[in-house]
Image: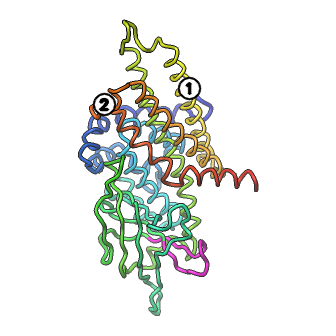
C-alpha cells in the first residue's frame, strides 16, 4: 500500500493484472516476432472495459480514478508493451475529444470508442515538427461557403500510432499561420475520408505490434462540426492531452521494468555458478537493490502525478518528472536485467531483449527526456 492508492484502485489493478497475465502475455512474443498488430486483442480489451478506462461513465467509460488507470496501464505493459502502446494511443485520441469537444461530439465519438467498437489515433507529430508542435505545416483552410461549414485539410503527419487501423483520427492543423501555436486547431477526421492516405507501417526497433504510420491529407474535406472547440484552441488541448499521456508512459515504463526485474530475480535464484545460485553474489544483490529502489521511486512519482490528476489539480510539472524518471529508470533496469541473464538474455528465445527494445522509445515519444527537463526547469525558474 502507498499513500496514493485506495482499495478500489488496487481492486482495478488486480483485475487488470489477472486479465493481462491470462490473455495478453501469452501472445506477446508472437506479436513481436511477426509484427502483428496488437489490435488482435481489441475484442478482449473491450470486453473488460479497458478501451474506455480513461473516460467517465457518462461517455461509456469505466469511471475509474486516474490512479486506477495508472495501475491498469502498468499491469498491461508488464504483459505486452505493444498492446499498451495501441491502447494508450487510443486514450490520447479520446482524451482530446473529452477535453476539447462539446457534449454532442463526446456522445458521437466517445461512446463507441469506449466500448471498443471504434479505435482512435492522435495525429500531432510531423516529419519536421516533433518536439515543437508549433512548427507544424499541416493546414486546415476554411472554405468560403456562406455557412462556413467546411475545412480543407492538407499536410503530412508522421509516427502516428494506430492510424491505418483506426476509425477516426484527431488531427491538429494550422488555421491561422500568423498566430503560431495559438493558430492550431483540432479536428476529428474519418480514417476512410476522401483525401486521407497512409504509408506502410514503420519498421520500428521495438513495439512491433503497436504500428505507427505516416498519414497524408490531400484536400480532405472536414465539416466544421468535427472541429474540437474554437479555432486556435487545439494547441492547449494537445498539451493537456500530453500531460495525461506522460503519466501513462510512466506507467508503461514501470510495468516493463517490473516485468524485467521479476524475470531477473527468478533467474538469479535458479542460475548456479560453482554450485550456488548467483543471487548469493553481493555484486548482483547490489544491482537488484538499486533496480528495485529506482523502480519504486519511479512508481511513486507516477502515482503522485496520477493522484493530482484525479483530484483536479495542476500536474504538468509532476507528469514531466514522472515520465522523465520512469523512462530513464526503465532503460537501466531492463538493461541490467538482460546483463544478469548473460548470453541467455541476449537470445531472442527469452523476452528480455524484447523489453530492452520496447522500452527504448519511451525516452523519445510524447516529449523526449530533454523536453521533460525543459518543462521541469521552466516551472522551477518561473
Q: Which residue is mark 1?
A: 290
Q: In percent of the image, x 43 and y 42: which residue is there?
A: 359
Q: In percent of the image, x 57 and y 27: which residue is there?
A: 293
User: Is residue 12 visible from the viewing direction of this image?
Assistant: no
Q: Position of residue 119 (x, y in %)?
A: 35, 58
Q: Earlier in the sequence, mark 2 or mark 1?
A: 1
Q: Is residue 62 magenta?
A: no
Image position of 62 with respect to 19: above or below: below
Q: Position of residue 201 (x, y in %)?
A: 30, 59
Residue 350's label in the rendered image is 2
Q: Secondary structure at mark 2?
A: loop
Taking depth in this image into account, of 112 and 201 the one nearest to the observer is: 201
Q: Position of residue 296 (x, y in %)?
A: 56, 30
Start and end of the magenta stretch?
173-187
Mark 2 Cα-neighbour bin, 10 Å: few <14, some 14–19, many ≥20? some
Residue at the top extreme, as displayed? 275
Q: In percent of the image, x 56 and y 67: which residue is there?
A: 235
Amino acid at each position: 500500500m502507498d499513500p496514493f492508492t485506495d482499495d478500489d484502485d488496487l481492486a482495478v489493478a488486480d483485475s487488470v493484472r489477472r486479465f493481462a497475465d491470462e490473455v495478453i502475455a501469452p501472445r506477446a512474443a508472437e506479436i513481436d516476432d511477426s509484427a502483428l498488430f496488437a489490435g488482435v486483442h481489441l475484442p478482449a480489451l473491450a470486453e473488460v472495459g479497458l478501451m474506455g478506462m480513461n473516460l467517465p461513465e457518462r461517455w461509456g467509460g469505466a469511471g475509474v480514478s486516474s490512479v486506477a488507470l495508472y495501475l491498469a496501464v502498468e499491469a498491461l505493459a508488464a504483459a505486452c508493451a505493444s498492446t499498451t502502446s495501441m491502447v494508450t494511443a487510443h486514450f490520447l485520441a479520446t482524451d482530446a475529444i473529452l477535453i476539447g469537444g462539446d457534449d454532442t461530439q463526446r456522445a458521437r465519438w466517445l461512446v463507441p470508442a469506449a466500448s471498443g467498437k471504434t479505435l482512435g489515433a492522435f495525429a500531432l507529430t510531423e516529419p519536421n515538427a516533433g518536439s515543437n508542435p508549433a512548427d507544424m505545416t499541416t493546414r486546415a483552410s476554411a472554405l468560403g461557403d456562406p455557412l462556413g461549414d467546411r475545412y480543407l485539410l492538407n499536410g503530412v503527419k508522421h509516427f502516428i500510432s494506430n492510424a491505418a487501423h483506426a476509425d477516426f483520427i484527431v488531427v491538429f492543423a494550422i488555421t491561422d499561420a500568423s498566430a503560431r501555436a495559438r493558430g492550431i486547431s483540432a479536428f476529428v477526421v474519418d480514417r476512410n475520408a476522401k483525401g486521407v492516405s497512409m504509408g506502410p507501417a514503420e519498421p520500428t526497433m521495438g513495439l512491433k505490434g503497436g504500428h505507427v504510420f505516416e498519414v497524408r491529407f490531400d484536400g480532405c474535406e472536414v465539416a466544421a462540426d468535427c472541429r474540437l472547440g474554437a479555432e486556435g484552441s487545439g494547441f492547449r488541448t494537445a498539451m493537456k492531452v500530453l500531460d495525461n499521456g506522460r503519466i501513462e508512459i510512466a506507467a508503461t515504463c514501470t510495468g516493463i521494468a517490473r516485468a524485467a526485474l521479476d524475470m531477473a530475480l527468478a533467474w538469479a535464484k535458479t542460475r548456479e555458478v560453482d554450485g550456488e545460485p548467483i543471487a548469493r553474489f553481493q555484486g548482483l544483490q547490489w544491482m537488484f537493490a538499486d533496480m528495485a529502489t529506482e523502480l519504486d521511486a519511479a512508481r511513486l512519482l507516477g502515482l503522485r502525478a496520477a493522484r493530482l490528476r484525479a483530484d483536479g489539480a495542476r500536474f504538468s510539472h509532476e507528469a514531466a518528472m514522472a515520465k522523465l524518471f520512469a523512462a530513464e529508470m526503465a532503460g537501466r533496469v531492463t538493461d541490467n536485467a538482460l546483463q544478469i541473464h548473460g548470453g541467455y538474455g541476449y537470445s531472442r528465445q527469452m523476452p528480455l531483449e524484447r523489453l530492452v527494445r520496447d522500452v527504448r522509445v519511451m525516452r523519445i515519444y510524447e516529449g523526449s527526456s530533454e523536453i521533460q527537463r525543459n518543462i521541469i526547469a521552466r516551472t522551477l525558474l518561473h
